[in-house]
Amino acid sequence: MASVEKFGKHAITRRTMHLLEIDSLDDWPEELDLKSKHFVLFLACDATDVLDEDLQGFAGRVIDQGMVYLSTWGNDAERVHDVFDEVDADRNPDSNADSVVLSEWHEDEPLPEALRFAVATATPAHDYEKSCKATLCVSVGNPDWAEQIRGWLADPESLEKAVEEEDEGEEEEEDLDLDGDGDDEEEEGDEDEDEEDEEEDEDEDYDGDDD
């Protein structure tokens, strides 16, 4: 049976960070020993082949175990988010802004950015702020993800560096795109100048004919 690994408290949220590595959602443990009544769940999962009914059953299980905030990452993350919202709405029809289970997805973001948001930024609804003292990070069916997450949770500074590197890479790509646009503009400028030269030549020829 999969066991939960415990790490330190994050300096910003003061929530204890945990990691659970499982092969599939079916391997989810019946009990979680997080020493916290409620928890934030970061779910790294490729849900492309997971049926809605399986996601619904999983959502109900983790909500019963105390999940009050879902941050999901990976293929089809938006659908996972939508299913969780539907399940929570069905189970807690009287919830309000202070008691709702919050959720968000990061389908198109790099893993370190999504993870950092979950451990350092995600904040549950008001009713759970004092009782939510844990962040459970779960890697489903991907040992490489689990190994990366494990390293970042053990050394949060390395997570910050990974996020910075991703940001720098995006900035470099933007700079390259801008340079490319500039080249296009220069080419268009050259074409305009050529057209103007041709028009001037035509005017000179016309003036010469009048003489």
Image (spheres, rainbow, N blue to C red):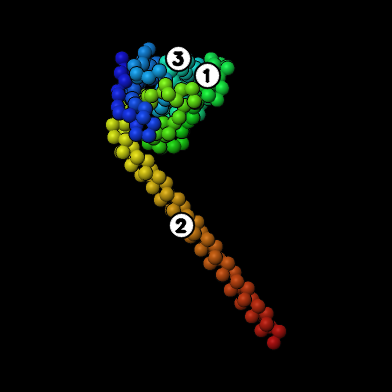
The C terminus lies in quadrant: bottom right
Which label's residue is closer to the chain start, 2 or 3?
3
Is mark 1 in CB contact (under 8 Å) with mark 3? no
Mark number displayed over residue 64: 3
Residue that label 2 marks: 179
Instruction: Left or right? Give the position of 210 relative to 185.
Output: right
Between 174 and 161, the one nearer to me in the picture: 161
Above or below, 176 against 33 in this view is below
Q: Find residue 193 and report its horizontal and vertical position in percent.
A: 56, 70
Q: In this view, does 190 lie to the left or right of 119?
A: right
Label 2 or label 1, whichever comes before in sequence order: 1
Q: Which residue is drawn at 62% across and 76% down?
A: 200
Residue at left offset 64%, top offset 80%: 204
Which quarter of the rendered picture does the N terminus lie within? top left
Nearer the observer, 202 or 42: 42
Residue at image x 68%, y 82%?
207
Q: Residue furthest front?
A: 130
| Foreground label between 2 and 1 | 1
Give the CA separation, mark 1 to mark 3. Answer: 10 Å
Image x and y of residue 25, in percent: 40, 19
Asked whether the residues under the numbered discs 2 and 3 touch, taking CB atoms below 8 Å apart as contact, a structural biologist would say no
Q: What element carries label 2?
A: helix
Q: Is mark 1 on a helix, strand or loop?
A: helix
> What residue sits 34% from the left and 26% below the top?
16
Location of residue 19 in the rendering, given as x and y in whole percent from the top left corner: 33, 25
